[in-house]
Image (tube, rainbow, N blue to C red):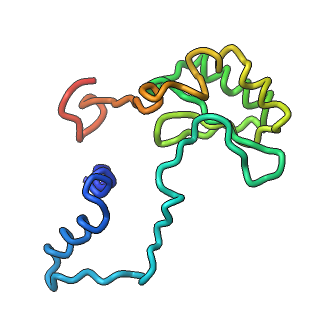
């Protein structure tokens, strides 16, 4: 049930969600933990795809689009090779089912972006429709699913 809570809050908005919770509270009152807004707008969903500067001088990270979150072993090996060659060898996964290669030397970014793998399926700059598609396992592996994938 908790998995879908973020979508409910996203759809209703925090204040409507809060009022619905208050209606169900014994005292009909839900005290705030703080008088100020603790969730800063800058931390709402960010777009990780593409090249972005890091806090560290001279470094950037590159968010790579994984079509519908599916990557084969050979492609993953190639992504690992790219991370080794152009950065520190680290790959990070996002909740949107994409991959980030952090700690890239800014002088090497053009070389990375010109790699054949990133000029094809795994583009850092996918179309708007493609960038928002994700894979779902369906009821074979998810207790909340009602259909097969």
Q: How many marks?
A: 0
The residue under the point 48% across, 35% down is 97
Left or right relative to 88: residue 8: left
The residue under the point 30% across, 50% down is 7
Q: Nearest the camera: 53 or 5?
A: 53
Q: Position of residue 43 (x, y in %)?
A: 52, 58
Q: Position of residue 8 (x, y in %)?
A: 26, 54
Left or right relative to 111: residue 134: left
Q: Position of residue 114 (x, y in %)?
A: 73, 19
Instruction: Give the answer, above or below, for where 108 lies relative to 33.
Output: above
The residue under the point 42% across, 83% down is 35
Q: Quadrant for residue 25, please give it.
A: bottom left
Instruction: Give the answer, above or below, for where 71 lies relative to 23.
Output: above
Left or right relative to 40: residue 22: left
The residue under the point 61% across, 40% down is 92
Q: Nearest the camera: 73 or 21?
A: 21
Quadrant containing the C terminus in the rendered view: top left
Q: Nearest the camera: 131 or 24?
A: 131
Q: Position of residue 17 (x, y in %)?
A: 24, 65
Instruction: Give the answer, above or below, for where 119 lies relative to 5.
Output: above
């Amino acid at each position: 049930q908790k998995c879908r809570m973020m979508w409910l809050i996203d759809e209703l908005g925090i204040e409507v969600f809060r009022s619905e919770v208050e209606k169900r509270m014994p005292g009909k009152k839900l005290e705030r933990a703080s008088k100020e807004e603790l969730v800063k707008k800058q931390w709402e969903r960010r777009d990780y795809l593409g090249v972005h500067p890091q806090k560290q001088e001279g470094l950037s990270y590159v968010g790579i689009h994984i079509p519908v979150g599916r990557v084969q072993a050979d492609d993953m090996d190639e992504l690992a090779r790219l991370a080794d060659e152009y950065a520190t060898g680290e790959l990070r996964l996002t909740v949107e089912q994409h991959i980030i290669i952090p700690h890239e030397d800014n002088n090497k970014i053009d070389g990375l972006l010109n790699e054949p793998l990133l000029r094809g399926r795994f583009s850092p700059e996918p179309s708007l429709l493609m960038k928002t598609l994700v894979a779902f396992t369906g009821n074979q592996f998810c207790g909340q699913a009602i259909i097969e994938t």
